[in-house]
Image (cartoon, rainbow, N blue to C red):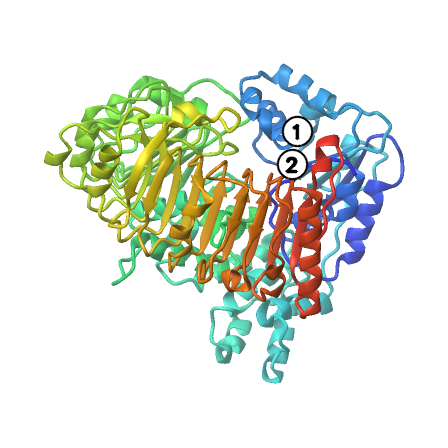
């Protein structure tokens, strides 16, 4: 079978459009052998992206094309970014070298990657022909049936690209299909109560065949008492609108039904560029720094902010695009029309202003929040405007940000609480920022590993996030004086890179005389290879509130997964006194033993080289729900799970281990929901008792032995025999190395 490339695409419920899916698939896999364009066109809110995603994920598409890639184009793009993102999807292992290439080299490289292969590339949300013109010369036509699938709200776009290519006009849902979708989302598998049938039918007709309108109305009704649905239905306009006006009216209703504390959280999403994936933890910390999140007895602000996000998702105003191991949301985004609404409403309420590149804001304007978006037109550099009341400054345009950085004008904004410079590469820490004493949130990409000691001037700082080409950043002794710190994190240079091995290096001199960081909850920590265990213990003893800890030993020595050479770190690491610790990732501590806190819920280990006999200490943790064992975290050929271990484990991942035999009893898997096996090519089989686990939802097996694959298939059959026909099994076997993948669900 051909090799495949996947993308993370949200997958909404599709109702009544199976005929449309089959039609698009037929046009992709049949017809002319020449490179062809298939365009899905229609007004916003019809579900073009959802339809394209369904087609993209279909098995017949996976097996027919050697290469699949997905890229969202949107209104603002550049040739470099367009080529770069497609290449990074096709060949993620070479992403680092691609970021260093210029446009011409990227264009040539993409051509080489596609040459001789049958490919399908999805270009989602295309606004004009310019994007196609930038890309077309990198798309070889080998007369092998390659295809471009694009979605656009502009019906004539595909005809401009290829005059003989007939666009596929996506039809609206019928009233019956709208009713079916509405009922599925409101009542799941249950029937609609007879007392509500007339109201629900009225609402379905109001949606005028637009799936987006359906899900938005569901978001309103789903958070309203059923005896008030009739009143809600009366407020929905019966006027027929054109284009996207109808969805905008529905969005206005959704916004008006929001509790007051959720309104600024929703509008804040307009500060991110259109079609942008938004890291959830970054978003929540921004909300907190802005003061949107209300304090509640017994709950942390981050937990409350997470509740806010889940409420917005439940109201269908925000989409979850990537989930965590236990189903929490890792990445989210909003629909184009929701984004358009948020920007318009934010400007109307003077909540947020958007500046496009080098444009100047016009009219009387003294914004409280400013987000700098990129622009396709370079234009002349204009003088930077002064906004005396500015509290929040977010940069998504690196050229304009560099202008501000080089002109040293951060001092103009002395009231700033939020400063996000992630997309600007700063060669050194800008000294002017050190005078912004009101800063609560700062995110910056640095070309230097040293953080200046004057960072202590930022005495209100809550979140400090640093990225760049380095594996660790050196904190000064004065860091202990910022008592408000909640999150100290190091992010990778590019989103596609793993964050393994990146962290802050704490000063260890005079630790006894330094105050504790009493409020620190999240920390990315790098331990120098020459340091001893006592240094780590002393640092951690000064972090009594830590909840999430990533701790990498000798990160600069073993960051490459292909050249790992961890130094032995013998001894016992006592972590059991960290009573609030819930999530822990430890790497590079070869030879160490651990004493873990009993309340630990998530544990990831890599490059620790423990014998399997030591895993019982983990198995006895009463609250452990997620366990990820990666990259020789445990060594040896046999793992025998003991009775009574892993009683609450819900997610288990074994990756790049040399294990051969794995024995267990059904008692060990009584709560297991997902099992992931990756590159355990010596493993003979998976314990057959997994077939008795009724909670099991998913098994993923990638690059494992044929016998292990067969044992998983046997488990799937046993699950079906006991009535669990919903078990999802994904298998990618070793033959992919020869260009032959197999996947089953």
Q: Is residue 116 left or right of residue 138?
A: right
Q: Position of residue 252 (x, y in %)?
A: 49, 58
Q: Is residue 179 left or right of residue 659?
A: right
Q: How crowded is mark 2: few (under 14 residues within 10 Å), some or many (20 or more)?
A: some
- C-alpha gap between disc 1 and disc 2: 8 Å
Q: Is residue 507 above or below residue 664?
A: above
Which residue position is annotated with label 1?
131
Q: In this view, does 238 lie to the left or right of 550?
A: right
Q: In this view, does 194 lie to the left or right of 418?
A: right
Q: Position of residue 151 (x, y in %)?
A: 70, 42
Q: Who is closer to the viewer here, 45 or 547?
A: 547
Regarding residue 411, the answer to whether it shows in the image is no
Q: Who is closer to the viewer here, 7 or 460?
A: 7
Q: In this view, does 316 lie above or below 474?
A: below
Q: Position of residue 73 (x, y in %)?
A: 62, 35
Q: In this view, does 423 lie above or below 310?
A: above
Regarding residue 56, the answer to whether it shows in the image is yes
Q: Quadrant of residue 304?
A: bottom left
Q: Who is closer to the viewer here, 545 or 8?
A: 545
Q: Residue at x 30, y 54 (%)?
A: 301
Q: In which quarter of the image is residue 551?
A: top left
Which residue position is annotated with label 2?
127
Q: Is residue 395 above or below residue 674?
A: above
Pick the quarter of the image with the N terminus: top right
Count all numbered tags in the image, as a single digit: 2
Are the residues tagged 1 and 2 within 8 Å (C-beta)? yes
Q: Which residue is drawn at 62% across and 78% down?
A: 192
Which secondary structure lies at badge 2? loop
């Amino acid at each position: 079978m051909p090799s495949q490339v996947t993308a993370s695409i949200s997958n909404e419920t599709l109702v009544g459009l199976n005929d449309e899916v089959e039609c698009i698939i037929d046009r992709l896999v049949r017809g002319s052998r020449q490179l062809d364009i298939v365009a899905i066109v229609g007004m916003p809110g019809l579900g073009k992206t959802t339809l394209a995603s369904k087609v993209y994920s279909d098995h017949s598409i996976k097996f027919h094309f050697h290469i699949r890639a997905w890229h969202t184009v949107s209104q603002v793009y550049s040739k470099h970014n367009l080529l770069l993102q497609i290449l990074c999807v096709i060949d993620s292992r070479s992403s680092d070298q691609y970021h260093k290439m210029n446009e011409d080299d990227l264009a040539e490289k993409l051509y080489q990657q596609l040459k001789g292969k049958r490919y399908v590339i999805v270009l989602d949300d295309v606004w004009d022909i310019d994007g196609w013109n930038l890309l077309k010369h990198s798309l070889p036509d080998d007369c092998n049936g390659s295809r471009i699938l694009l979605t656009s709200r502009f019906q004539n776009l595909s005809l401009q690209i290829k005059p003989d290519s007939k666009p596929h006009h996506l039809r609206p849902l019928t009233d019956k299909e709208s009713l079916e979708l509405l009922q599925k989302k409101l009542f799941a598998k249950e029937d609609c109560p007879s007392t509500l049938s007339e109201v629900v039918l009225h609402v379905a007709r109001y949606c005028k065949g637009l799936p987006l309108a359906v899900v938005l109305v569901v978001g309103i009704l789903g958070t309203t008492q059923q005896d008030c649905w009739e009143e809600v239905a009366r407020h929905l306009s019966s006027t027929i609108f054109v284009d996207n006006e109808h969805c905008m009216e529905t969005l206005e209703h959704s916004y008006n039904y929001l509790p007051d504390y959720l309104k600024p959280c929703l509008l804040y999403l307009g500060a991110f560029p259109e079609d942008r994936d938004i890291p959830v933890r970054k978003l929540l910390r921004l909300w907190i720094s802005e003061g949107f999140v209300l304090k509640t007895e017994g709950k942390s602000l981050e937990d409350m902010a997470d509740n806010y996000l889940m409420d917005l998702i439940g109201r269908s105003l925000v989409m979850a695009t990537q989930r965590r191991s236990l189903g929490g949301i890792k990445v989210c985004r909003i629909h184009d029309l929701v984004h358009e609404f948020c920007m318009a409403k934010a400007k109307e309420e003077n909540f947020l202003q958007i500046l496009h590149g080098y444009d100047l804001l016009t009219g009387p304007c003294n914004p409280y929040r400013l987000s700098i978006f990129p622009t396709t037109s370079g234009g002349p550099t204009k003088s930077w405007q002064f906004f005396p009341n500015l509290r929040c400054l977010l940069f998504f345009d690196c050229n304009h940000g560099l202008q501000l950085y080089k002109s040293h004008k951060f001092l103009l904004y002395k009231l700033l609480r939020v400063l996000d410079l992630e997309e600007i590469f700063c060669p050194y820490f800008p000294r002017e920022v050190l005078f912004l004493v009101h800063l609560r949130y700062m995110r910056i990409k640095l070309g230097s590993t040293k953080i200046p000691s004057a960072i202590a001037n930022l005495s209100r700082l809550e979140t400090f996030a640093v990225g760049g080409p380095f594996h660790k950043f050196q904190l000064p002794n004065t860091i202990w004086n910022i008592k408000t710190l909640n999150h100290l994190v190091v992010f990778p240079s590019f989103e596609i890179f793993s964050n393994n091995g990146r962290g802050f290096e704490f000063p260890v001199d005079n630790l006894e005389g330094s105050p504790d960081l009493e409020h620190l909850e999240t920390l990315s920590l790098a331990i120098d290879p020459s340091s001893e265990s006592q240094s780590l213990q002393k640092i951690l003893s000064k972090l009594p509130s830590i909840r999430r800890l990533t701790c990498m030993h000798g990160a600069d020595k073993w960051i490459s997964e292909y050249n790992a050479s961890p130094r032995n770190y013998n001894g016992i690491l006592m972590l059991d006194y960290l009573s609030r610790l819930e999530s822990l990732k430890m790497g590079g501590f070869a030879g160490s033993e651990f004493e873990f806190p009993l309340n630990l819920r998530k544990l990831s280990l890599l490059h620790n080289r423990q014998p399997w006999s030591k895993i019982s200490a983990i198995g006895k943790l009463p609250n452990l729900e997620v366990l990820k064992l990666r990259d020789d975290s445990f060594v040896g050929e046999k793992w025998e799970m003991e009775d009574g271990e892993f009683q609450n484990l819900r997610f288990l991942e074994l990756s790049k281990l040399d294990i051969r035999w794995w024995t267990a009893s059904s008692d060990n898997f009584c709560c297991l929901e997902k099992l992931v096996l990756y590159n355990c090519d010596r493993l003979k089989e998976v314990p057959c008792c997994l077939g008795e686990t009724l909670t099991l939802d998913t098994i993923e097996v990638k690059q494992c032995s044929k016998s292990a694959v067969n044992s998983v298939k046997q488990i799937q059959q046993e699950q079906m025999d006991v009535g669990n026909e919903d078990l999802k099994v994904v298998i990618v076997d070793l033959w992919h190395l020869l260009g032959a993948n197999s996947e089953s669900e």
